Image (cartoon, helix red, strand yellow):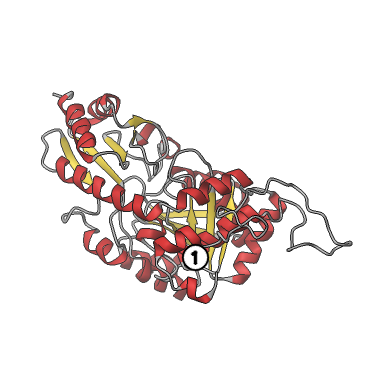
Amino acid sequence: MTHDENLHGFATRAIHAGQEFDPTTGAVIPPVHFSTTYAQDGIGNLRGGYEYARGGNPTRDALQTQLASLEGGRFALSFASGLAAEDALLRAVLRPGDRVLMGNDVYGGTHRLVRRIFGPWGIELTTLELGDLEAAREALETLQPRVLWLETPSNPLMKITDITALAELAHAAGAIVVVDNTFATPYLQQPLVLGADVVVHSTTKYLGGHSDVLGGAIVTNDDELADQVRFHQFAAGAVSGPMDAWLTTRGIKTLAVRMRQHSANAQAIAESLVGHAAVARVYYPGLVDHPGHDLAARQMRGFGGMLSLELAGGASAARRFAESLRVFSLAESLGGVESLVNYPSEMTHASVRGTELEVSDAIVRLSVGIEEVDDLLADVRQALTALA
């Protein structure tokens, strides 16, 4: 992008960053480059730097330009999945004996990756309630972790953590600050601007936005760190394929308008659940009584499309509610245009049962889509009525 284009608003950059028209035909949508290898103008004389698809692909590069622009970063790398991105990042920065300090409510797959894959290789893991800044300060000073891992809003309890405050504390202790921005997306929150060193995404979710493409990404302003992760990506090979990159780029072009509707629908549903006899608690940062509401209002420009609720009738009620929804589909994942319901304790967070991150079996998580809000509200009401 040119300097002037970098000054454009979010929605404009989402559509145009990395998306220059094809110089040969003038096609407004750049072609998808499927080639795995590239002809060289003499040995070592590469055209545009392209040699082999694992090392570089024009379609993937276009997506990376788009991602970096939206997160306010200089470097972005696109991976085959969110966990592949996390794995490459952690292998790049961790050595045996290092420690990761992580929030006590995060995606179960992230916790599993560090505990069960990196743990046997000598990486220590500590989880903490990161909303308590004094406890975080003490842990950072005492444990001297190599990485502080934040997820805000968290999965599935929608905890909000103060990125700026924690980044200052972590940097004073010599830690790298990583923020999983999957739930918020760069439209609602930009962690690099708030002091984080690295942003990670499961692009499968809101960025792709249509439940039809798997992917992950990291974004950073640190050139040395970017080089380290890029080497691991190239050497281990967990790159996104060209069609996956293209589908993700296509999804991102509507991210701004989708996130506005996701947020509006989720707000309406959260408010409708408050005070219902069958609902013990609603977890949504857009509610004024949410513990992180004020912080979220400062740190984000909207509250997102994710919410969780605790059913007063416990596990049996939670299961019945999840299985009674009709517009919401019972399925893993989140962030698509369609609404999904998930039962974390046996689905996305089954891997953390028996740990300090175990999710109550009375909790149901909703990924609120962009359907007509009246249809979603009616569906939630009928499912709650089924509990009577």
x, y percent for residue 173: 47, 72
In the image, 288 versus 150, the foreground residue is 288
In the picture provided, is 229 more to the left or to the right than 151? right
Q: Residue at x 59, y 46 (%)?
A: 80
Q: Residue at x 53, y 42 (%)?
A: 214
Number of numbered labels in the structure image: 1
x, y percent for residue 318: 26, 30
Image quadrant holding the C terminus, namely: top left
Q: Quadrant of residue 322?
A: top left
Q: Which element carries disc 1, helix, strand or loop?
A: helix
Q: Residue at x 72, y 53 (%)?
A: 235
**Would you say residue 90 is visible in this rendering?**
no
- Mark 1 residue crowding within 10 angstroms, few (<14) / some (14–19) / many (20+): many
In the image, 85 versus 18, the foreground residue is 18
Q: Residue at x 83, y 58 (%)?
A: 40
x, y percent for residue 30: 59, 53
**Would you say residue 242 is visible in this rendering?**
yes
In the image, 127 versus 54, the foreground residue is 54
Q: Quadrant of residue 370?
A: top left
Q: Residue furthest right?
A: 42
Which residue was labeled with disc 1? 69
In the picture provided, is 157 more to the left or to the right than 103? left
In the image, 244 versus 147, the foreground residue is 244
**Tag 1: residue type?**
Ser
x, y percent for residue 156: 34, 45
